[in-house]
Image (spheres, grey):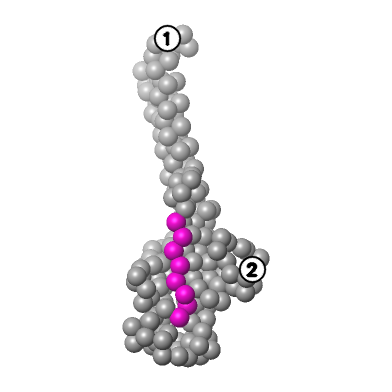
């Protein structure tokens, strides 16, 4: 059980899972930015060392280099901020009634997609790559009978556990609310208990 609350949460709705993107992909992005940040310094240092050139602080060349470095590092900081927004503010929520995908689009825009549990037809997980297997994160795909037929939780920790949790909840909902209308909304495709697939590729 989680103390997390979100906009539109119903009074009797209980949050069971709150998922953020795994930290490993974010750190990979940070490492790439660190390499990019070091590159111009190394190149400039190498050029000065090989040519024995001087770069006086009162020269035009020094001013041009300073402006370039300032703009370049401002660009990298902007990228880092965007990566952090994706990592920290994108939230995937599973409650006892629905699944909710909250995505931050830039600083001032947020998109919320949701589907009730009784509309879910199938849940699968996918783990791709060495890093994903090593740090145990992957994507969870949810097939529904709604307008948005398929949406997914991206790069979440322990995707197999997430799949089992959602399937268990949907089975419970269908047992507690076993009526023809719900089955009709699922396009006449009731899912067998325990359905689901885990796709893992190195």
Q: Nearer the viewer, mark 2 or mark 1?
A: 2
Q: Which of 191 and 97 is in front in this view?
A: 97
Q: Is residue 59 visible?
A: yes
Residue 59's disc is 1
Q: Is 162 drawn above or below residue 109 in the view shown?
A: below
Residue at disc 2, secondary structure: loop
Q: What stretch is highlighted in magenta?
A: 111-118
Q: What element carries label 1?
A: loop
Give the spatial CA distance, label 2 vs label 1: 60 Å
Give whichever of 9, 120 is nearer the camera: 9
Mark before the other along the chain sequence, 2 or 1: 2
Residue 12 relative to residue 186: left or right: right
Residue in front for this viewpoint, 43 or 142? 142
- What residue lies at 37% left-to-right and 85% top-to-bottom? 184
- Pointer 1 local density, CA inside 10 Å: few below 14, some 14–19, many at least 20: few
Residue identified by numbered label 2? 2
Disc marking residue 22: none
Most distant residue in the right direction: 3
């Amino acid at each position: 059980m989680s103390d997390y609350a979100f906009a539109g949460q119903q009074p009797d709705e209980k949050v069971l899972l709150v998922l953020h993107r795994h930290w490993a992909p974010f750190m990979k992005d940070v490492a790439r930015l660190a390499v990019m940040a070091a590159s111009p310094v190394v190149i400039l240092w190498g050029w000065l060392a090989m040519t024995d050139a001087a770069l006086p602080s009162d020269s035009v060349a020094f001013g041009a280099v300073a402006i370039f470095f300032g703009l370049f590092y401002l660009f990298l900081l902007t990228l880092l901020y965007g990566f952090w927004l994706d990592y920290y503010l994108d939230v995937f929520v599973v409650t006892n009634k629905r699944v909710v995908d909250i995505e931050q689009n830039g600083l001032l825009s947020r998109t919320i997609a949701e589907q009730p549990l009784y509309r879910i037809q199938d849940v699968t997980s996918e783990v791709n790559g060495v890093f994903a297997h090593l740090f145990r994160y992957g994507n969870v795909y949810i097939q529904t009978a709604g307008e948005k037929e398929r949406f997914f939780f991206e790069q979440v920790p322990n995707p197999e556990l997430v799949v089992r949790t959602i399937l268990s909840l949907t089975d419970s909902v269908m047992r507690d609310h076993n009526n023809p209308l719900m089955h009709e909304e699922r396009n006449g495709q009731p899912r067998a208990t325990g359905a689901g697939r885990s796709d893992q590729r190195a």
